[in-house]
Amino acid sequence: MPEARIERGHTGRLLYGRVRPNEDLVGAIADLCRDNGFSAALVRGSLGSLTEAVLETAGGRQVHVTGAAVETLSLGGEVRTEAGVLQAHLSGTVSDAEGRVFGGRFVPGRNPVCVTFEVALEEWIAEAP
């Protein structure tokens, strides 16, 4: 059985951010948190497209989705401080120009924003153990 961890805490500020064209989605979301003083956050909503997407499936296979615009259908995840560095862990679904749908974890550094990408982030404030 997988190991589970329970963390107590509460939510804080809500941030609505915009990711610019050609920025990597995963890195830019971590940057938004860092630039606004969040040490952890939950992804609450998003709207946007990518010029391409690289997703990792549950089996570890990478799927490369290309097209004029890769639409993001869903996005969820969190941003955490790991070894002193903010890291975004994002999963979701995308569709290509032919309407095919793909899902998995967004691979950092491989998901450039097309025109713009809007995201809502909610600060997570963990209680001391």
Image: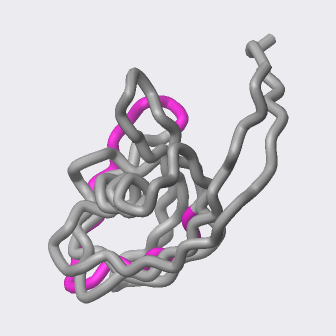
> How many numbered marks appear?
0
**Residue 9's x, y, as percent?**
80, 41
Q: Quadrant of residue 92?
A: bottom right
x and y percentages locating residue 25 in the rendered image: 33, 63
Residue visible at 38% across and 27% down in the picture? 84
- Residue 104 visible in image: no
Q: Quadrant of the N terminus?
A: top right
Location of residue 92 with respect to 129 vertically, above or below: below
What x and y, as percent, mark residue 72? 46, 75
The residue range painted magenta reads 58-75
| Residue farthest left in this picture | 22
Q: Nearer the viewer, residue 127 or 20?
A: 127
The secondary structure that dominates the magenta segment is: strand
Magenta segment includes 117: no
Give residue 87's position: percent from left, percent from top.
41, 40
Q: Is residue 66 left or right of residue 43?
A: left
The answer to which of 40 and 48 lies nearer the viewer is: 40
Name the residue at 50% across, 30% down: 59
Query: Measuring 22% from the left and 49% from the top, which residue is drawn there?
Result: 109
Residue 63 vs residue 110: left or right?
right
User: Is any atom of residue 98 visible in this view?
Assistant: yes
